[in-house]
Image (cartoon, helix red, strand yellow):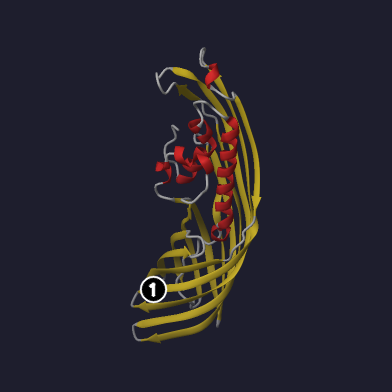
Amino acid sequence: MGIKRLSMLIQIVIFILLFPMMIYAWTYDATDALEDLEGFASGLNTLIRDNLGSMSYLGEPIGYSFIKRLALGVGAGAIFFPVKNIDIGDASDSIDYGLLTFGYLPIPSAAAYGRFNFDIVELGIKVGGLPEMEFKNAGVKGKNLVIGGNLRYKLVDYSHFALKGGASVGGLFEYAKGGITLRKGQPLLITDPDTGEVAGYLNTDSAMETSWEAYTVGGEIQTNIQPLFLNFFIGIRASKTFGTAKSKLISRYEIEPETGYESNFGTKVGNADIDIESKPEKMDVFGFGGVEAKFLMFVVSFKGSYNLMNQSFVLDGGGRLQF
């Protein structure tokens, strides 16, 4: 497609917008192409919908079950959505799956956060996401806002010589709102597969807008153990997300046959206007764990999380001042 790897997201979605001309460039049938295009857009919308609960998860990779006094930090990482099972209908045999070798679609995010201790209760807040960004050469722009908060209750807090640890249980609330807009006009040369001669030209102008808004509520239990300056932690999080994922796809394409090849193309003009809206249906259950290293008041943290319900995972890390 002439597009270098800006990100897996840009590749996949632009590929979705342009795949009808790759599949049906010869003996073109616009009706079949539009049916597959709608199926592909629906599959992508379902992927976003099923992962709305992960959209706001990033940005607070904190592993202590309970902060002694105060912590202020930043975090960043990416959510990886599984795209291997998107149903694209009858076009599946014609698509180059080299674009999907990795099998996951990453969405990055970053956040700033604070945690505050009130005896046996701890309050946490975070604000993050990504500011609006635009890559004009790739025809893509996007943004994402994340706001979250939680309360933890101290279950266990112990210290024996060089070994410390604890456990806590808590509730959480998170809000995420964002979207991605992609636009691509791409002329394509059509050649005769037998002779290699130019048979015509396919001109396209396609755009896709995907937006989301989600509210997530849930709870988690977490435990940690600290040998010396390291801290290892594991936990389980269960949550329910209420929200909507919307996708709008517009695609215009027109064939200009060379003289003598007019009869080889079934339809010379195609149009697609697709609007899809869906809501989350299932709960999310995450298992998570990681490690931290503390140097005086500074803590470096790394965390991995896996969604047991839809096989997405999150990798994030960060640094904070802890008092």
Mark 1 residue crowding within 10 angstroms, few (<14) / some (14–19) / many (20+): many
Identify which residue is drawn at 53% across, 24% down. 202
Outermost bottom residue = 160
Q: Which residue is mark 1?
A: 232
Tell me which corner region of the image, top left, top right, bottom left or bottom right, holds residue 281. Answer: bottom right
Q: Nearer the viewer, residue 77 or 211?
A: 211
Element type at mark 1: strand
> Looking at the image, is 120 positioned above or below residue 149?
below
Q: Looking at the figure, which quarter contains the N terminus? A: top left
Q: Percent x, y for residue 133?
A: 54, 44
Q: Nearer the viewer, residue 160 or 94?
A: 94
Q: Percent x, y for residue 160?
A: 37, 87
Tell me which corner region of the image, top left, top right, bottom left or bottom right, holds residue 207. Answer: top right
Identify which residue is drawn at 38% across, 72% down. 296
Q: Percent x, y for residue 13?
A: 52, 42
Q: Nearer the viewer, residue 239 or 89?
A: 89
Query: In the image, what residue type sits under mark 1?
Result: Phe
> Looking at the image, is 152 positioned above or below residue 242?
below
Identify which residue is drawn at 52% across, 59% down. 111
